[in-house]
């Protein structure tokens, strides 16, 4: 990686907070399947719910709220409806699309095999590159990250990813899109008479 924050001394992600429908099942998956230690549990005041924290490595945590009255998820809006190889990537503005965990490049393929052995459905390995399709069938000098995707019991899209090269100035070369570039179907957000 290059560069660094010149405004604030940030040390990564303290925690990312998601919402669980079943905290026991969430513990079984994140601690039991993925091996993340449960390091802090809280009952929220006034019966609002719970807030649990898992150590996901590097001083970072993945946290979950459990709310007794949380609305059900809306696949394709609150999160992608499935995995990228199934053609599912879209989620709404302000949604959390997926969580990618950094894994060592030398253990990447073994970790995929181990998840499959634990009964987790995983995507094919994707070699992300700068080609027009963004994916290469093989690892070459243009591949900058390798990854595969899977979902937790609530359908939260997760990814194991490993960087394969260091970025330089040429890796920041695209003009950012604006709200004016969005395409919204005509029947959505149209004023009603």
Image (tube, rainbow, N blue to C red):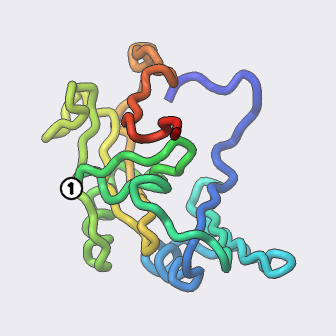
Q: Is residue 43 above or below residue 133?
A: below
Q: Is residue 70 above or below residue 141?
A: below
Query: Horizontal placement of 38 versus 99: left or right?
Result: right
Query: Horizontal placement of 132 versus 1: left or right?
Result: left
Q: Residue at x 56, y 85 (%)?
A: 24
Where disc 1 sits, the SS reads loop
> Total of numbered circles in the picture?
1
Q: Residue at x 60, y 54 (%)?
A: 58
Q: Residue furthest right?
A: 46
Q: Which residue is mark 1?
A: 124
Q: Residue at x 55, y 76 (%)?
A: 21
The spot of residue 110 in percent (x, y) is 28, 63
The image quadrant that residue 157 belongs to is bottom left
The spot of residue 60 in percent (x, y) is 63, 55
Query: Horizontal placement of 185 versus 126: left or right?
Result: right
Q: Residue furthest front?
A: 193
The answer to whether residue 159 is visible is no
The spot of residue 63 in percent (x, y) is 64, 65
Q: Residue furthest bottom?
A: 24
The spot of residue 38 in percent (x, y) is 63, 75
Is the residue marked by circle 1 packed among few (<14), some (14-19), or many (20+) residues within 10 Å? few
Q: Residue at x 27, y 64 (%)?
A: 122
Pick whichever, 174 or 145, lies toward us.
Answer: 174
The answer to whether residue 150 is visible is yes
The image quadrant that residue 119 belongs to is bottom left
The image quadrant that residue 137 belongs to is top left
């Amino acid at each position: 990686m290059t560069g660094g924050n010149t405004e604030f001394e940030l040390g990564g992600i303290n925690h990312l907070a998601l919402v669980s429908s079943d905290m026991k099942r969430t513990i079984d998956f994140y601690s039991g399947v993925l091996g993340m230690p449960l390091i802090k549990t809280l009952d929220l005041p006034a019966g609002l719910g719970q807030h649990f924290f898992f150590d996901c490595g590097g001083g970072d945590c993945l946290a979950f709220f459990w709310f007794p009255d949380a609305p059900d998820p809306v696949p394709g809006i609150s999160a992608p409806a499935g995995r990228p190889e199934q053609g599912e990537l879209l989620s709404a503005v302000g949604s959390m699309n997926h969580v990618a965990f950094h894994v060592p490049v030398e253990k990447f393929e073994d970790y995929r095999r181990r998840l499959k052995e634990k009964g987790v459905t995983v995507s094919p390995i994707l070699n992300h590159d700068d080609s027009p399709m963004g994916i290469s069938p093989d690892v070459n000098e243009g591949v900058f990250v390798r990854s595969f995707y899977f979902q937790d019991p609530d359908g939260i899209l997760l990814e194991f990813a490993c960087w394969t090269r260091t970025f330089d100035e040429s890796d920041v070369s695209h003009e950012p899109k604006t709200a004016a570039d969005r395409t919204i179907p005509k029947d959505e957000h149209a004023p009603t008479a």
